Amino acid sequence: MSEAKNQETVNNENEAVVQPEEETLEQAQEAVEHDVEALLEEARAEAEKHKDMALRVQADMENLRRRTRMDVESAHKFALEKFVNALIPALDSMEMGIDAANKEDASIDSIREGLDMTFKQLLDVLGEFNVERVNPTGEKFDPQLHEAMTMVPSPDHESNTVIETFQKGYTLNERLVRAARVVVAQ
C-alpha cells in the first residue's frame, strides 16, 4: 500500500511539473497570436493610410490636369487679345476716315492724309508685335526672304539685285511670314 501511495505521489509531482510548462506554452502561443494580430492591425492601418494618400495624390493630379487644360485653352483663346486691343485704335481711325471721306467737303488731300496716318498706325502696331516689313528694293536677292516673280536684264543694276518689289514681305520675330515678291536683275 505504501508503495502505491508513493507512486501516486510521484505522478502528482510529475503532473505538477508538466502542468506549468503547458500553461507557459499556451501563454506564449496567446502572446504570439496577440502580437501577430497587433502587427496585422498596424499593417492594415498603414495600408489604409497609404491608400488614402494615393487617392489624394490621384485627386490632386486630376485637378492639376484639369486646371492645366483650362489654362492652355484660355491661352489659345485669348493669345491675340493684346494684338486685337492694339489694332482697335487703327480700326477706329479707319472708320473715322471713311466717315470723313463721305462728307461733301472732303478733299483728296484730307483723305490721303487720313489714310497715311491709319497706315502708319497699323505699321506701328505690327512693329510693336515684332512684325517687320521686308522691302528689298535695291538689295541683293535673298531666296530665304524674297520670291522672284521674274528676272529682267538691267544695265543699271548689278546682277541678282532686286529692282522692284511687287508685294512687300513680312517677318514675325525674324521668321518669314510672307516672302516679298520681287523683280530681279539678270
Image (cartoon, rainbow, N blue to C red):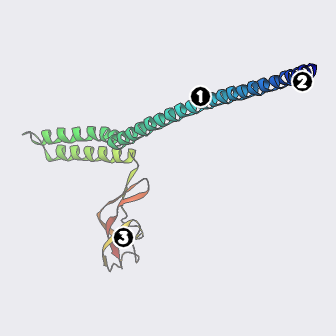
Q: At which x and y percent is residue 91? A: 23, 41
Tell which circle, 3 or 1, labels the residue nearer the N-terminal end.
1
Residue 88 position within the rendered picture, expressed as x and y whole percent measured from the top left: 26, 38
Please determine whether, in this image, residue 156 is positioned above or below residue 38: below
The answer to whether the residue labelled 3 contacts the one labelled 1, judged by CB atoms less than 8 Å apart, is no
Left or right of 155? Residue 110 is left
Task: Between label 3 and label 2, give the one nearer the viewer.
Answer: 2
Please, what is the three-letter code of the amino acid marked with disc 2?
Answer: Gln
Q: Quadrant of the C terminus?
A: bottom left
Q: Tell me whether circle 1 and circle 2 mark residues in contact (CB < 8 Å).
A: no
Question: How far is disc 1 from disc 2 in space, using C-alphas?
Answer: 57 Å
- x and y percentages locating residue 147 in the rendered image: 34, 69
Q: Mark 3 highlights which residue?
A: 162
Identify residue for label 1.
45
Q: Is the residue marked by circle 1 packed among few (<14), some (14-19), or many (20+) residues within 10 Å?
A: few
Quadrant of the snapshot with the N terminus: top right
Give the CA distance from mark 3 to mark 2: 133 Å
